[in-house]
Amino acid sequence: MTVATQAGGGGHVDRGGGGGSSGLADVVELILDKGLVIDIFVRVSLVGIEILTIDARVVVASVDTFLRFAEATNRLDLYGKGKGGKDLTELTQGMMEGGAKGKTAGVLDAAVDKVGELLGGDEEDEREPVRKRPRQRARERERER
Amino acid sequence: MTATYVYGLVAAGTTLPEDLVGLGPSGRVSLVEHDGVAAIVGDVPDRPLGTRDDLTAHEAVVDTVAAATTVLPMRFPAVVEDSQVIDELLAPHQDRFLRALEQLDGMVQYSLKGRYVEEVLLKEIVEEEPAVAELQERIRGVSEDASYYDRVKLGEIVAKAMEERRDVDANDILDRISPFAEQASPTTPPQPDEVVDIAFLVRRDGVEQFESEVEELGADTHEWLRLRLLGPLAPYDFVPAEE
């Protein structure tokens, strides 16, 4: 039914759905939550639905989510500091996986800071905004017209 | 009692696509018509329903038919007694079904979902939220146990910052795509990095333009947003509620 990549487009949007090509989570969301219900329908016994529904709906923001974000943010910080930081990051991660957590990471992180300073690497000013928001884009296009 | 599975409703006189495979043992799917309305029906397996295959079969039947004609989709699972398809389903609700089919005539649904590219958003948040950098400084070099509460707090601030950005971005996306749809039904997704989950009701003759607008939005935002478009689908989110 629907093709995976868009004809004519750059293929920046994942496509799915329509006639069985959706993922199970999408299907569950569509057919268990929505659609017509008539009170005369016979009660049928169901298997597995409850489990499926729980699987499909991710639990709302929790401590786990926060910790995940915190970890991702801290990892990102290492990337952000200075050039050549990648090797150190990899090294750090290897060590963290090896069980030497916390302290070692901190020391290495400080080292990355130093490298950053030595390279004079504070590029914040010249960095272009990564995000072009939809509305900005729309306005830009209007101006172009 | 023999039971009949009901996938959805269409206008009488509809021709079903040939390649439909139902969830019953025969796999057959057919129509039962009554006074302008038809039920898309099939047989029911002799076991409880709800396997993965049952769910995908239901969706595939409904949405394959929806690709060509307007379908009122039934919520899974819909089973009636064989003899009662007309007497209990079609006849008593004929009015309501006809009106809904008419309202949705010539339209399909698309569901648009979007998720942030985490790294890009986190970078933006670290740069724009001073509290994040402060906490990172405090966590640095401290053992995992000792920094637990600071890490939770950091994550909470990040999640909140992401939600604030998402509210803005979700509105922008809605504003930008809505002009190409008849109706839009947005829901707020459960996770902060999930930006949008919007159902759009689109005229069949406007489908191409709608899809290319979404594609253009995707091209403009792909560096920080992963968009997923499902459809064309039956109008799941736009079935009129019972009066």
Image (cartoon, coloured by chain):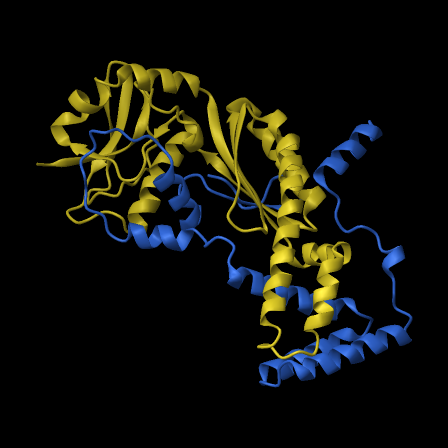
Chain colours: A blue, B yellow
Residue at the location (21% across, 32% down)?
A41
The image shows residue B76, relative to residue B148, as above or below, that is above
Quarter of the image for the C terminus of chain B: give it.
top left
Along the line of sight, the residue nearer the viewer: B176 or A60: A60
The image shows residue A12, relative to residue A104, as above or below, that is above
Residue A138 location, quadrant: top right
Q: Position of residue A83 (x, y in %)?
A: 82, 71
Q: Is residue A42 left or right of residue A73?
A: left
The residue furthest left is: B1
Q: Position of residue B126 (x, y in %)?
A: 73, 59
Q: Is residue B165 left or right of residue B38?
A: right
Residue at the location (35% across, 41% down)?
A32
Residue A9 visible? The answer is no
Q: Position of residue B165 (x, y in %)?
A: 67, 46
Quarter of the image for the N terminus of chain B: give it.
top left
Residue at the location (68% across, 38% down)?
B216
Residue B175 visible? The answer is yes
